[in-house]
Amino acid sequence: MHWGNDMHGGDIYSHKIKHDFSININPLGLPLSGKIAYLRALKKISNYPDQNCGALAYALSKRFGVSAERLVFGNGASELIQALLSAQKARKVLLFAPCFTGYERAIKACDATPIYFYLNEKADFSFGEGDFPLLADVFKSEKPDFVIFTNPNNPNGRLFDGKIVDKIIQLCVKNDAKLLIDECFIELSGSENRFSSVMKTSDSKKGIYIIRAFTKTYAIPGLRLGYCLCPDNNSADILKLKLPEWNVSSVAQYVGVALLKTRYLQKARKMISRERKYLTEELKALGFKVYNSDVNFILIKETSKQEDDSASLYKELLARGILIRDCSDYEGLGQGFYRMAVKCHKKNRLLIKSIKKVRGK
């Protein structure tokens, strides 16, 4: 497990970066309405934020048809994940590896222990019906009290089948384990409504939490805004007690409400689908193993071992001012795995041309 310093994407401060392919945000960037809302919100920075995020909660409750009281907001999804583990007093947390490295940090902060179920690389790190007996064995032997399930998964970007998700939920309920479904990328996949039945459930006995974020969907990682849909009002109140007062700025709240009114996500999904296909075909032609993705980033693997780590794709591109995500710190991966964001065609072409040059193609 990786308890040391991780290698999160977006570190444009340690190096001179011209093009950042390490973070997976909407390639269309912040829409104009969001920029206008940001400027208007500056008038509010002399006032304390609404602790209840009332306007934002109301807008989301109408969008998803859920009670506003079940929504809890955070300074990005990461804050909510750590707070949720703490609120539920998690002790053994089951993760599907490889997965977002930030979970380990949150688990460590809560003095809990991570348990891993390793996804099959040969199946593009997907989870199938045949994996349930093995997963049931893990529940029986390790007895996790909390499960984190990422959909689409990170770093490979694969969506899990709806029936598979339902069966995982059933398995968690059967074993009295709370479940967090991390859907931070799902709105960029075009399948954001697939699990609407899960979103609308209010059965507190199931203990299902769903986290999403404006960060990736609307390209505002520097502003920070995420939310958690809790099983019921009581669980939401418990989670709020683990969060600081005024943890969501008035600017973030105001911009968030404005972004929920935009209609540019459909355009973004079409671009992502088109450009993901382009990158996949080009990277395969260059000899990389490319794992199937349903969202705005791609996981690849070197098909030949590098004799010298200094010749790694990551370092060679970094020398040219291009940052990709080195995935060697992901549990279940290792050297030679890289993740890159899907951007606009001009930038994607630049990335491919740069890879060709460093690989002498």
Image: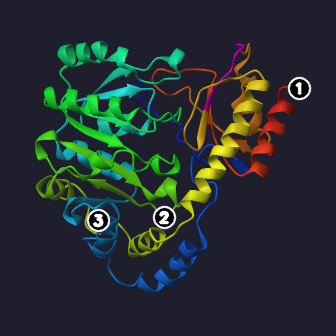
Q: Does residue 300 belong to the magenta stretch? A: yes
Circle nearer the viewer, 3 or 1: 3
Residue depicted at x 42% and y 76%: 254
Residue 338 horizontal/vertical position (percent): 62, 30
* Left or right, residue 208 beside residue 214: left
* Circle 1 crowding by C-alpha within 10 Å: few under 14, some 14–19, many from 20: few
Q: Indicate whether 339 appears above or below 186.
A: above
Residue matched to label 2: 223
Between 102 and 192, the residue placed more toward the observer is 192
* Magenta-colored span: 299-305
Mark carried by residue 146? none
* Left or right, residue 210 beside residue 336: left
Q: Does residue 311 belong to the magenta stretch? A: no
Between 47 and 97, the residue placed more toward the observer is 97
Residue 12 visible at all:
no
Q: Quadrant of the C terminus?
A: top right
Mark toward the start of the polypeptide (3 vs 1) = 3
Residue matched to label 1: 360
* Left or right, residue 225 beside residue 122: left
Quarter where residue 128 is shown = top left
Q: Quadrant of the N terminus?
A: top left
